[in-house]
Every structure is written in structure tokens, then in C-alpha cells.
Amino acid sequence: MRALVLTALLFLLAACQSTRTPPVYSDLVTRINAGEEVAVTDLQAAFAHREDLATVFPQLQELERQALAIMADEPLKLGAIGTAILDLYQGSLAGHMVLEAFYTHVDSGDAIGPHTAWISRIRDAIGTSAGTAEDPFEVTGQAEAHAHLAAQQLEPVGGIYQSEPHSPLILALLGKKEGGPVRTAFYSLNPMYRALTARFPSAEETAAKDSPTNDSKSKKKPSAEEAAAAEANQALAMIGILARESDTAAQTSVGAFLATRRRTEDALGWLGAAARNGNLVANMLIAGIYRDQIKDAPDDKTREEYKAEIVNNYTHAIALGSPDAMYALGVLYLNEQFGKENVAAGIPLLERASGLEHGDSLTYLGHLHATGEHFPEDRNKAADHFIRASILGNPRATYAYARLLLTPENKLAPDQRIHEWLDKLADQEDAEAMVHLGNLHARGIGVEQAPRKGTRSAFRWYRAAVKQNPDDPNIVNEVAWTLAVSDVDGLPQPRFARSIMDRLMTDNHDAGSRPEYLDTWAAIHAANGDFEEAITLQEKALSRAQELKREDVYDILKEHLDKFRAGEVIVERAP
């Protein structure tokens, strides 16, 4: 699950304001009854601004939930309940779905058509959005989100509420078909949010009431901090109401919030309630809580109990079809978290998740094939996994594929899409993608250009990467090292390398004490002809390596020191 923002519950905003005055709902119903076609978006906007929304909406939600629950098994009851739903809201997807099912069951062909047409129009209106967190589907509430899943023959398997700046209340809903992957869709619930806020004083009123400066004579507007705190409390109260009404997405949200406040027992209580009702997001969060706690377990018995909880909750999520759970548990097995004897259990889980097009699992398996760990070394299989994951938009896979193409022993023809994937990431201000683009241009991989033009293009990408993220020591160190020691003719730029490395090592205390970064800094001084300073810095790098017991780098650091003492610069394959 591409990152669900759990703590966003604290920052639910006031309902979005529209500059366009919505039509009156009763007027639209009159037009519909007269045979006119009304835009679904107008109907939804009018419904959201009904004066009696706070009263009508809970009734609508309850009827829609009941209808969806009995639609498959009790079709004869659907006529009355569907009619009641449409009496409350003519644009209800659930209402038209259940009436279509009812008239189909009683074989009333003429009555089916209008509801089928409404279903198509409502789905088309919802489908004008992408269903992502940035561009969520617009629906009236939680029940319509579930109806939209049902219309796609998807079974809900989990959900959680969150917020984005463009929408105050969003439901991330997970659904799947039998044997298929879990899909996550995001639904904006603005009418539901408006109905819920009607139960409370406005955030501004609450802030004014709670302000320490408030008195009967003062009409001073509350401060931004006071208003934000009131909004947070109001949002939590809303989610709490939904959680107490057995909304498992709300229970999961409450549990996630409590976990961030280290109220672990309370969090596990809410998450456990959601998990028992089939919310795999709750299972994933419970497993994560125990993973965080295991390192602080007071004894072996407790540690084993935590491990059992981790396995049980990931297994429940896997049973509901979660490739994220397959990946998480598989990696734990491979990292020997459950003993060396269980390591082999990790591979089938990763392969199963990969079969469901899970990008992280494909990437992990690609690394295993590339390094010959748990599999015979096979660069072709590694590349295939990285390419499949890159097609899915996994940045780590794209980086890994670029690195694979750069290895000296590589004989693979590059997939020409590698530059397209990296360009797209670079357009999103991804500094690491810029470095990889520089590397590929420097080596002429996947490009047709003269060597000199390639080095100029490489330098432009390296400079862009450092400009994008000048305080990232990994980015700066890699670029500086390459531009100081590269064996590519025309690529070294030792003065630029020194300028960016001097800034990093002066401003970043942690970087300034790392043996690897000191080694780069020394090599840059040597490349600029300052061997005296290079020797001083390299001796410091060796001293730090000894302090840190970094035996893995000691020999190479000593080799470089000997070169500097001999007045030699470092030249090696880079990138």
C-alpha cells in the first residue's frame, strides 16, 4: 500500500468552499420527475447542500448499508428499501443498484432500464476522477464508496480514513476480486463530512470558547493555533462517532492515531475490533506495532508472543489477499527474524506477491537474482524483475536496473524505457534519478550520442541532482566522487567536486566524521593537486575507521593513503 497517511487525522480541514452556488435539491428532483436529465454532479452538489442534510444523511447511509448487505441473498426485500433510498437521494448508486437487482429478480424488464441507465451515469461521473489520493473519486459517503466497489465486482477487504489539502475527508478503500490483486481506491466524502460537522459547533466557535482570552465582552477572532487545535479535536470526534458505529475504517484510523500517541493497548483494542471484521489495514498495523515492540521485549517468552502476533496478523492479511503482507512477512523470514530454519519460507511469499504485480516484491527478487542469494546468479532474471517493477512505477526498481546496466560485467542490452522512467522521476524533482541519468549518459548506455556530448549531458544531470538536494550526503558524495576519480575521458570536474564536498563536510558534522566521505574529500583534494591536505584527511579517515571498527573499509583507505603519499591521484571506473 503505497503509503496511507495515518496521522493526517489530526489535520482534517474545514469543508471545501465552492465559488459556484449549487442548485436546490428539490428543484432538481422536480425536473427529474418531469423527465428531464439532470447532471449527476449537480445532483450530488445539491444534495450536499440540503438544509436538512444532517438529518437525511444518516438515514440514507443506514439504508444503503442495509441494502448492500442483503442485495445478493434477499432480492425480494430490495424493492421497498431501494425506493426508500431514492426518496432520500435520487442519485444514490446503491439505491439504483438494488432496484436494478430487484426488478431483474421479478423479471420486470421495463422497470430495469432506467436504473441501469442511472448506474451507468453515476459510475461515469465518479470515473471522471482517477481514484488516487491526489484525485479521489467524488461520492456522497462511505456507503456509496462500497457500492462503487460492488459495481466493479470487488469485495471490500479494508479501509482507513485520511485527509488531503484538497479534500477534508477521504476514505482509502481496499477491494479485490477472487484470485486477483488488492486494489486501493480513494474516495472524497464531502457530503458525509458536511453532515458530520453539523453535529458540532464550528471549529472557530470551539476555539473561541476554549481560548484563555475569551470573555463575554471580547469578540476577538481565535488565533490560528487555537483554530487548528479545535479542528483537530472536531475531526477526532467525528472519527470517534464513526468508530463507535462499527465503521471498521474509522476504528482503524482511531487505532492508528492512538498508536502514534504511544497508547498501545488502546490502539490494539480498536485495531483488533477492525481486524475481526475483515479490515486487513488493521492487521497490517497490528503487525507493525508488534514489530516495533519486539526489540524492547522484556524476555524471550514475550518476544516469542510478539513474533506469533506478527505472523498471525500478516497471515490474516495474506488470507484477504494483501501482497503488502506477503512482502512484509517474506522479508522477515529472509532476514532470519524467525530463525535460520524458516528462511526458505520467505521466497514463496515474495513470488506470490510478485505474481500479483507487487513492485517491492519484484524488486527484492531482482536483487536476489542479481547477487546470487537464495537463487543462482542470473542477471537476465534480475533485469526482468526490475523492468516489471519499473513498469509498475517502482522507483527503487528503476534505480536498481540502472545500476545493473552500469556493472562492468553487464552484457544486457538496455531496455530503452530506462531513460523514460528516470526522466519521469527527474521531472518529479527526484535527485537520485538525476544521478542515474548522469551515470547512463556518462557511459553511453541507452543513448546514441558522441562521447563528448555524453559527458556534458552527464555533468548537467549531476549538477542538477546536487542543486535539487544539496544537503543529501549520499547524493553529494556520489557526484563528487565520480567527478573526481572517473576514468571516463572528459568527465572529471575536480574543482566543482571540491566546491560541493567542501560545503557538505563543513556544514554536516555527521558527514564530516564518516570514513567514506573523508575518503572522497581526500581524493578530491588530490585531484586538485593538494596532496598535503589529501594525506591529512585520509589519515583522519583511517583513524575514524579504527574508532568505529570499520574493518570493511580499512584496507581501501590505507591503499588510497599510500597513493596520496606517492603523489598519485585515484582513477577508477566511475560511474
Image (tube, grey):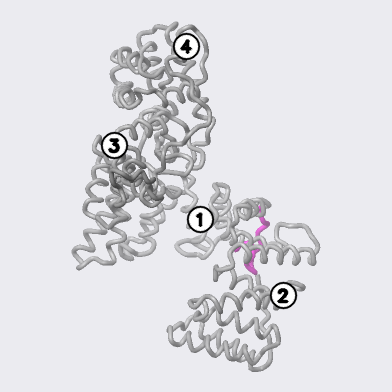
Front of the two marks 4 and 1: 4
Q: CA distance from mark 4 to mark 3?
A: 33 Å
In the picture of the structure, the residue carrying the numbered disc 1 is 363
Task: Mark yes or no: residue 392 visible.
Answer: yes
Element under label 3? helix
Front in this rendered view, residue 405 or 467: 467
Q: Quadrant of residue 432?
A: bottom right
In the picture of the structure, the residue carrying the numbered disc 4 is 32
Marker disc for residue 242: 3
Lower position in the chain sequence, tag 3 or tag 2 = 3
Front of the two marks 3 and 1: 3
Q: Residues within 10 Å of mark 3 (few under 14, many from 20)?
A: some
Lower position in the chain sequence, tag 4 or tag 1 = 4
Residue 459's x, y, as percent? 71, 67
Q: CA distance from mark 4 to mark 2?
A: 72 Å
Task: Mark yes or no: residue 325 visible.
Answer: no
Lower position in the chain sequence, tag 4 or tag 3 = 4
In the picture of the structure, the residue carrying the numbered disc 2 is 493
Which residue lies at the image location 48% right of the left edge and 57% below the top edge? 364
